Image (cartoon, grey):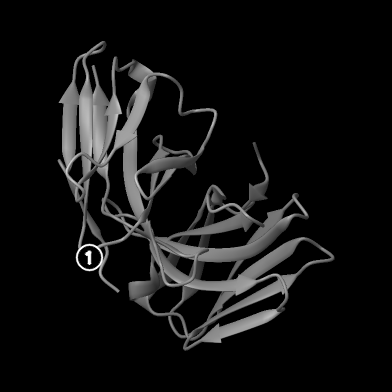
Amino acid sequence: DQQVKQNSPSLSVQEGRISILNCDYTNSMFDYFLWYKKYPAEGPTFLISISSIKDKNEDGRFTVFLNKSAKHLSLHIVPSQPGDSAVYFCAASLTGANNLFFGTGTRLTVIP
Amino acid sequence: EPEVTQTPSHQVTQMGQEVILRCVPISNHLYFYWYRQILGQKVEFLVSFYNNEISEKSEIFDDQFSVERPDGSNFTLKIRSTKLEDSAMYFCARQGISYNEQFFGPGTRLTVL
């Protein structure tokens, strides 16, 4: 089951720069997408979400972009801060269902 | 929004033993989920539970697994006869204001020896 993919296992960014985390999906029936951040020994923390009827959603330093034709979404963090260092998971849900399909995660390291 | 708490934080058990993992909601929610994450792998959906009934379940959630809300408060995941491959982090989640958004607990690390 590889319906949601995060092809970059890790990413390093200098503090103050932009972090761009990418996610691809294969199921065109997904209608809602979410990003979660996870620290070691903690549960995933909800960051930001986007409905398939939109192509952008912004919340403070976090912006999610959705390109439905390419089945691709990305999370932009700007400016990046050392506290943003964590594993970021992309997730998606289907119309009429509530369970989430997760990607494998990308470990972001923000270098001071 | 407040999350959920989970107990225990770490459970070690022998293969073939039964384990019960608990999820305690901070406030009175109706929709709950269990997920697991095997070390190094992605978070996988197990089951959703709405108004004291299973709503959806994945292929992983076989006859060895069960969920219930015995006292109307705690939400439990039981594994009847644990296998080595059940070793994972188990996360409970509750539904947010938007039905698509879920808020996770800190997880229980299950180690099967």
Residue type for callout 1: Ser
Say what secondary structure mark 1 lies in. Answer: loop
**Viewer-nearest residue: B53 or A25:** B53
State whether residue B106 is above or below residue A12.
Answer: above
Task: Answer yes or no: is residue A86 visible.
Answer: no
Which residue extends farthest right? A69
Q: Residue at x 75, y 50 (%)?
A: A27
Q: Residue at x 25, y 70 (%)?
A: B2
Which residue extends farthest bottom? A60
**Viewer-nearest residue: A83 or A64:** A64
State whether residue A3 is above or below residue A14.
Answer: above
Quadrant in the picture for residue A65: bottom right
Question: Viewed as shown, does residue B32 lie left or right of A34?
Answer: left
**Viewer-nearest residue: A32 or B73:** B73
Question: Viewed as shown, does residue B47 lie left or right of A39?
Answer: right
Image x and y of residue A13, in percent: 50, 72
Image x and y of residue B40, in percent: 44, 38
Task: Answer yes or no: is residue B5 visible.
Answer: yes
Question: Viewed as shown, does residue B108 lie left or right of A16?
Answer: left
Image x and y of residue B66, in percent: 34, 28
Q: Which residue is mark 1?
A: B27
State whether residue A103 is above or below residue B81.
Answer: below
Image x and y of residue A6, in percent: 61, 53
* Chain of the residue under label 1: B
Q: How many C-alpha atoms fall within 10 Å of the one at disc 1: few (<14), some, or many (≥20)?
A: few
Q: Residue at x 64, y 50 (%)?
A: A4
Q: Residue at x 17, y 37 (%)?
A: B10
Question: Viewed as shown, does residue A96 lie left or right of B16?
Answer: right
State whether residue A12 is above or below residue B72.
Answer: below
Quadrant in the picture for residue B96: bottom left
